[in-house]
Image: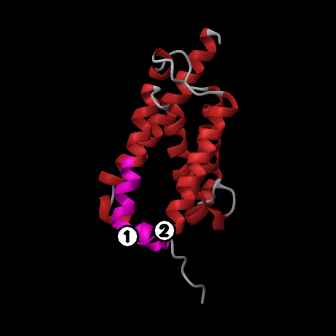
Amino acid sequence: MSEASDTALLLVRGVLGVVMLAHGWNHWRGGGGISGTAGWFGGLGLTRPRLQAWLSVLTELGAGVLLLAGFLTSLACAAVLSVMLVAGLLAHRRNGFFVFKEGYEYVLVLGVLAVALGVWGPGEYAVDEAADIGVTGWTGAGVVLGVGVAATAGLLAVFWRPRKES
């Protein structure tokens, strides 16, 4: 891979990592903090909303740190994908496509970017590369999709109880 490509991957990882850190920080310390986040999750039909709020914070902060370091990049991307799938399915899908209408546009872009990063790998400027543990190509995509979708399905199966429409 060229130096320009490795730099581009560092930029993509960096931006996605910072976005996830900001999301996690906001769920923890922003606005209503954990209580506000838990209330919002409860309104989406998730049981044990306080636990969900903390799991979200830990997942988003953890994925952000891992992406910035380029360490366990495929698993970090799977975490991003899972968070975006849950958000897209429970909070944004019913609002249509456009983000300015609270639609799924934004979470779709972040989720697809996470899968693409799984294919590309973290690039040269990453712990994965230095430790020779990078996972790329179809294998990387498979890890991101497999772990991300399985985590989402597991969370929804255990904790989501959709509200009955009246």
Quick check: 26 above or below 15? below
Question: In the depicted view, which residue is nearer to us: 116 or 27?
Answer: 116
Quick check: 43 above or below 8? below
Residue 45 drawn in magenta: yes
Give percent across and percent down for residue 164.
Answer: 57, 84
Question: In the depicted view, which residue is nearer to us: 6 or 131?
Answer: 131
Quick check: 105 above or below 114? below
Quadrant in which the C terminus is drawn: bottom right
Read off the residue under disc 2. Answer: 158
Give percent across and percent down for residue 139.
Answer: 65, 33
Circle 1: is it few (<14), some (14-19), or many (20+) Cα within 10 Å? few
Read off the residue under disc 1. Answer: 48
Q: Can residue 87 be seen here?
A: no
Question: In the depicted view, which residue is nearer to us: 101 or 24?
Answer: 24
Residue 125 drawn in magenta: no
Place residue 153 in its image quadrant. bottom right
Place residue 95 in its image quadrant. bottom right
Quick check: 104 above or below 90? above
**Residue shown at 67%/55% (left/top)?**
98
Quadrant in which the N terminus is drawn: top right
- Numbered-mark total: 2
Tell me which segment is drawn in magenta: 39-58
Residue found at the far bottom of this picture? 166
